[in-house]
Amino acid sequence: MTALRDLVRPWQRYSYGFLDESAKRAVRRGLLKAIAIPGCQISYASREMPMARGWGTGGLQVSLTLVEPESVVKVIDQGADDGVNAANIRSFIARASGARTTTDTLEATLIQSRHRIPEERLTRNQLLVLQVPDPEPLRAVVPDISVARIMHADADYGLMWLKLYEQLVQAGRVTQSSSYPSLVNGRHIMSPSPIPRWDTPKLHQAENLTLLSAGREKRLYAVPPWTDVKPLEFSDVAFKVEDQTGRVCERTGATGQFMNEMPLLDGTSTFELSDAGFAEKLARRRAGEAVTIGPTYYVDGELQP
Amino acid sequence: MAYVAARGGETAIKQAECLFREALGSITEERVCEIQRSLPYLVDRVMGEASLYAPDLAALALAQSGGELSEAVLLLRAYRTTQPRIAYAAPIALDRQLTVRRISAAFKDVPGGQVLGPTLDYSHRTLKTEVLAGQPFTPTPVTPAEKPSERAPPAVAGWLRDQGLVPPADDTEQDSGDIPDLTREPVLFPAPRAHTLQALARSDTGGTLALGYASMRGYGSVHPTVNEVRLCEADVMMPHPKGGHFNAGRVRVSEAEVVSRAQVDGKPILKLGFAATLGWNEVKTIAAATLDLAMNTAGAHPANETEFVLYHTEPIESAGFCLHFKLPHYVTFQSALDVFRGGGAAADEASPEEPPDVAPDDTPVLEEALP
């Protein structure tokens, strides 16, 4: 006689990847819709995670939905693999999925990041998941999401342009720093998450798929491969990335990449590469190890086509 | 110097957690039971904000978090979301439940009477300091009333409806499983009433009180009269596979109903504001019922906006976001510094054929640029 227990899978305290199957299905549906309408914010239930809201729970839900046992996972916070929260998220994904982890961008198949895109160029076999604190690029001009939703539907972006123009008039330059609003696929204005302006052009016509997820605000959006992502700029005032001229990484001697600035007692600063995985490889190569370093988006501070 | 592989953070976070847990010591079943027994109102508050009725789990969450309330609520919420939905209980009609406390401020007396029940409302708030000197405090035993109060006094709102003072209730039967569920779909605005009431039920006690109080104090248009406050032990009636319902146990439920004058088509009427939570959370339900009335009425105060109220009284979202500012923000700050310094060489690339009309003023720059 067949017992009931023969018909079901053995009981587990948590599902594979922590999230239950219905939660994963809801995230997948949201992601498919987000990919179909590049840059458009798709609402989703956003489950509570065993981590505080605002600490990467949105990115985590996407990563846990897509991770597989054979995935290779890299997690960075502000570019660093050893940031305390990156370490925490990485160990949770590894624990919930059994996937291997890495600090090498080239090796990773799934990269969850808070506010940086790696310097080495991502390829078609890689997924980038960006954590998003505030998905609404129009928040600064209209705090109510119900109103912003209607403005997106109407492509009513006049207030956003006005905001940038006012910055220009009042301060002599566009003062938007990170989270630079960008037009995706010629239709939706998107917040690329608080990545520096340096990273924004990396999304344009990228080979990889980028998924953006705001857990607290319950919104998903995506930049599919080979999609236009254009930072808002006036025809006579060009978009500018952060200036890295003259900055040399103290540990690796690298130049022309995004640097962390560290103040010194004498009033000057020292610099180090913000992309810690990249810096690690450069340092190892310097020490004589054979290390594969991929092509970078920027060479000597110049964006490569 | 050899480059140290990126692993420093892992040891640090592990040890930080060890420090916290070591200070709390072993968590035993006795400790959890003691919390449940001695702090029922704290357990109720956590269960209300977590929207999960499980006194033992709530007490465990309090034990694990050392009483850090937002941590305890997060623990319980994170557990709740992993649990499957097995069945939907029948709706609870509060005027048919075992009522231990039911008062109305709108009338001197009401059908069923004013039932004070267990409360500190009329106590003198003095510390029993003798306890600290080794003298236990033993409460005076209750003297049973000659005539016990009604088991389930009728709702005051029923009388108001009979009098035509408030519009009749919508009695449409709805399958419990069809009610929009805030925890399974995102709230969008205008929010369905089910979402509004669910969000208020699981809202942060302090946040709800702050906004409700602001509205009551005069920033809002609502001057509430407490029509009814009720604490119940409600029966959980579950559908039986063979039809009908069976009683699966009781949960503590609190409810508040406030009335305020309003106008419909130029005619004055009374409007009801309502809130209910799992656990006995009186102050939250009164504040929430007031917000239920205040939301979507004309007025410039934030308490008049459903979106403002529901977003900003979410306990784990607000606490989590506030705490996230402890995370490093040095990349965004670097980006802001770049703008503040004027963009260096990149500024030269710009083609300022016509410099801006207004003289650059440095004051607003950093403010705008800061993330």
Image (cartoon, rainbow, N blue to C red):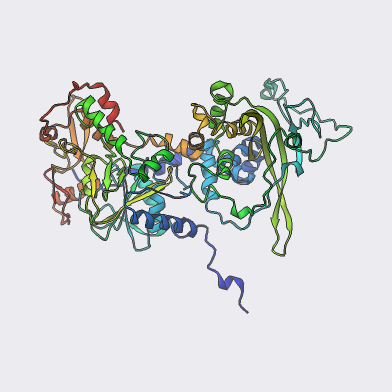
Residue visible at 38% across and 51% down in the picture: A91
Comparing B278 with B54, the one in front is B278
Residue visible at 18% across and 43% down in the picture: B1
Q: In the displayed structure, would residue B77 be above or below residue B348?
A: below
Residue B10 location, x and y as percent? Answer: 36, 46
Residue A153 location, x and y as percent? Answer: 37, 46
Comparing B330 with A218, the one in front is A218
Can residue B10 be seen from the camera position used here? Answer: no
Residue A151 image-quadrant placement:
top left
Residue visible at 20% across and 53% down in the picture: A121
Can residue B278 be seen from the camera position used here? Answer: yes
Total numbered circles: 0
The quadrant of the picture occupied by the N terminus of chain A is bottom right
Residue furthest out toward the right: B146
In the shown orientation, is residue B191 left or right of residue B33?
left
Residue A20 location, x and y as percent? Answer: 49, 57
Q: In the displayed structure, would residue A224 be above or below residue B188?
A: below
Comparing B275 with B297, the one in front is B297
Residue visible at 72% across and 62% down in the picture: B243
Comparing B138 with A81, the one in front is A81
Residue A268 image-quadrant placement:
top left
In the shown orientation, is residue B201 left or right of residue A61?
right
Residue A18 location, x and y as percent? Answer: 46, 55
In the shown orientation, is residue A163 left or right of residue B352?
right
Residue furthest out toward the bottom: A1
